[in-house]
Image: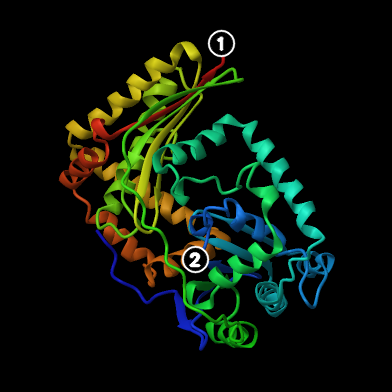
Amino acid sequence: MTPPLERPPFEVGTLPNGLRWIHQQVASPTGHVGLILQTGSRDEGPDEEGLAHFIEHLLFKGTTRRKAYHILSRIEDVGGELNAYTGKEDTTLYASFLVRHYGRSMELIFDIIQNARFPEKEIPKEKEVILDEIDSYRDSPSELIFDEFDALLFGDHPLGRNILGTEESVPKFTREQVLRFVQRNYRPENAVLSSVGGISAKAFERLAMKYAAHWTVSGPSPERLAAPKIQPKTEIRELDIHQCHLILGGTGFDAHHEDLPALVLVNNLLGGPAMNSRLNLNIRERHGIAYQIESFLNPYSDTGIWGVYAGTDEDAIDRCQRLILRELKLLRENRLGVGQFSKAKTQLLGQMALAQESNGNLMTALGKSLLTFNRVDRFDEMVAKIDAVTPSQLLEVANRVYDPQQITELRFVPRN
């Protein structure tokens, strides 16, 4: 039974500059604050591949008030953490700290976002760091295949590009490119300030007004290039590796799709994090031919993808592929029984509840939800959405998404 709706545990607001904020007060001695910007590798132009990630690195290299050392020491000197990361559609700058350092942390975040200098002398150094990161990444085919799968699906569209950039694009970046990208994309009206910690919403709003309300950017907001229609493909690449790597996947649902909760449920049943997922039980445990196997969903603002990844031996890769396709077929053809369906929903809801136990993860989830949907579901509302899914809907979604005629396949195999 779905529990009755409760008062939201969080409060939201908007500053005069258009920056939205969300705060959830918790009984904790720590605080977590993140500034989530609606810009990522998807927003790069043809000559900017990797620029969003490059800028994320440069943000910590000094402001008009602080040198790089002082930025890093400001939070770490009090036992906290300051970091950032870049995605396809967003960039996040965040801090975790003792509650007494809320003001210190928020002041630093907005000093960085408003006053970053992007020193010319730091640019060559950071290029070398990222080129090393790219080399390290290419040494890990189990990670590389995910980005190569994106490239296979989306082609030359920005969603198909590697977030890190390439060995050709990164060395060409200039400070002028950095400044143009920041001016174009780092905007308060396209960002959310998210917080979870042991202070009241009123106290948090006062800090936000003090440190964030003066952040303004002139000029119009940029528009994104629409996502392309995905066409199924098959590709086999030979690499200097010992193990084979395989992804099967295709078009999923975007973040706003009404059937996304049903797809999340069927994906979790297929190959979610639990050891009793169908893929894990039937391919790893029963047949013993894939040490690592999982399914995934990546919903974006106007498109989405799904996939199944497996790492296996060369002599087992064809069998592994057939077994994956068999599991997809079973989901398309067999309606779950009452007991199976109830168990699948109970498992997903338990995983969702456990994910909210981490205040840092909760801060990010609240902020990204507000950024994407301009609203945040309470946990009881999320429960209601999962409870509303029916076995018939699950079957219909599996048939739509796991259409065998629309599956793209990418393999990494050892070079002969």
What label does residue 38 carry, if any?
Answer: 2
Spatial CA distance of label 2 from label 1 is 44 Å
Q: Residue 377: which quarter of the image?
A: bottom left
Above or below: residue 14 compared with residue 193: below
How far across and how far down the image is residue 342, in percent? 26, 45
Quadrant of the image containing the C terminus: top right
Q: Residue 243: which quarter of the image?
A: top right
Give the residue at the far left of this rendering: 392
Q: Residue at x 54, y 87 (%)?
A: 202
How far across and how far down the image is residue 165, in percent? 60, 47
Above or below: residue 414 compared with residue 136: above
Q: Is residue 168 visible?
A: yes
Above or below: residue 240 compared with residue 22: above
Query: Which amino acid does the dot numbered 2 rest on?
Result: Gln
Q: Residue at x 58, y 63 (%)?
A: 92
Q: Nearer the viewer, residue 329 or 68?
A: 68
Crowdedness near tag 1: few (<14), some (14–19) or many (≥20) residues, C-alpha within 10 Å: few
Residue at the spot of label 1: 416
Q: Earlier in the sequence, mark 2 or mark 1?
A: 2
Q: Secondary structure at mark 1?
A: loop
Q: Residue at x 22, y 44 (%)?
A: 397
The reply to whether discs 2 and 1 touch (Cβ–Cβ < 8 Å) is no
Quadrant of the image containing the N terminus: bottom left
Q: Which colour scheme appears in the figure?
A: rainbow
Q: Nearer the viewer, residue 106 or 32?
A: 106
Query: Which amino acid does the dot numbered 1 rest on?
Result: Asn
